[in-house]
Image (cartoon, rainbow, N blue to C red):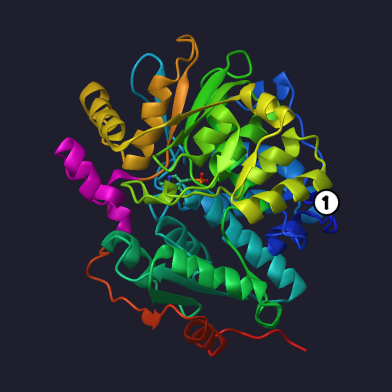
Amino acid sequence: MHYVSTRGRAEALDFEGATLAGLASDGGLYLPERWPHFSAEDFAAMRGLSYVETAVRVIKPFVGDNLTEGELRDLCTQAYGRFAHAAVTPLVQLDHTHWLLELFHGPTLAFKDVALQLLGLLFETFLSRRDTHITIVGATSGDTGSAAIDAVAGRANIDIFMLHPAGRVSDVQRRQMTTVLAPNVHNIAVEGSFDDAQALVKRMFNDADFSTRFDLSAVNSINWARLVAQIVYYVYAGVRLGAPERPVAFAVPTGNFGDVFAGYVASRMGLPIERLIVATNVNDILHRALAEGDYSQGTVIPTATPSMDIQVSSNFERLLFDLGGRDGTALAAQMAGFEATRAMRLTNAQREGAAALFGSARIDADEMARAMRWAYDAAGQVIDPHTAVGLAAARAAGVDPSVPVVTLATAHAAKFRDAVERSTGVRPSLPSRTGDLFGREERFVTLPATFEAVTDYIAGRATPRRG
Ligand SMILES: *Cc1c(COP(=O)(O)O)cnc(C)c1O
């Protein structure tokens, strides 16, 4: 299986190459050259399979010769063995049509563990084969940082430097990062906003000297391997609710369009998905793009769902490429226009292609709080604010009542317990697997939000490229 860039100019890579590269050298994102396809019999044969066995079937066509089936099974067994639920991503029924797919049973309580636990192991496997080292640098508003740190702590050939905005992540989120004391983990609190931290990271990647000297690598959802791991739970849930005979709809709390793009891939692979409902908060660029064809960037408004406070959704480019006939030259021009003006129109082909599968909704703070209360009153479920945005969109979507609607529950309620308590009066407690989070030693440095301060710190601790 080969991977091509959405901007048409980078060389095609195999799965291992695309995983280690992250972003393509022409600024585009990698996609497989064609979608693997499963028949109705293939889906029917997955009915009784465990999560790990489902993962092996779904991921195998994407890895080509880079991993044997046995190696892939070992990695999936290790990654998902760390989840606190035997079903890994269990379904919970809310009423006669609505379901939750709980994606938060991993070590750091958000769905990012599903992808990053596997990605950490893939990195380690591929790096030790090549006998090379990488330096992961990222900026986080909370969930990605903790999931990435947990996934690579103590692994050979990897250092991770994670920047978070000082004082602007929750105590739980900060402690999930800073109490990991493995020597390859480096937490940096930047005296600035998330956008400042993100801008510093972008500048490091764009600095060719710095980025090649330390072999910088990214773990955000532009990494293709992350999306592959997320296709699995759409298939797992779809098969349990009646695929291939019966279609299923999914409502997805969306930020960077990674999670919902994995659902799009599942649909392209043959899973009968009736509708993919893209749920945004008031930062609604994706809702405007899907409803009106208007992809224009606004200013980010902070909400109770920080992981969705995004005004540019990196993975949307993958959808536009696939729906626009996979024309890298045309897409590169469209993206260059967006980068220059911070706005673009979808083409007719892109709009019509998207409308065939996607719905969307913009959910404000009141609608979010109401969905949280409904889940509690109707089904006794305490859900997190991100999940509540998804559920509000699911309930507003008007899907045929014979079709089950699955809302992706992307975070554990305890991760956002202040917001949950405000809406429901219930203060969720942290599950026992987080251990003594508030009793453990923290380790991080606080640095000014300047390029010099942060790169000096990293250069003093990262492993430079050999030779
Ligand atoms: C990251 C995240 C999202 C958004 O997912 P995308 O793949 O960026 O669309 C939603 N909810 C939670 C809790 C998250 O951590």
Q: Is residue 48 left or right of residue 133?
A: left
Q: Is residue 123 left or right of residue 416?
A: right
| Residue 6 shows in this picture | no
For the point 63% across and 71% down, which residue is it?
A: 205
Q: Position of residue 392 (x, y in %)?
A: 36, 28
- Our reading of the magenta stretch's main secondary structure is helix
For the point 23% across and 42% down, which residue is it?
A: 420
Per the image, the residue denoted by label 1 is 8
In the rendered image, the quadrant that contains the C terminus is bottom right
Q: Please check the rendered image and state whether residue 417 is part of the magenta-colored stretch, yes or no.
A: yes
Question: What segment is highlighted magenta in the picture?
Answer: 412-434
For the point 57% across and 84% down, which residue is it?
A: 462
Using the image, determine if residue 355 lies above or below residue 129: above
Q: Position of residue 231 (x, y in %)?
A: 61, 38
When asked about the image quadrant of residue 236, the answer is top right
Using the image, determine if residue 287 lies above or below residue 397: below
Foreground residue, 132 or 334? 334
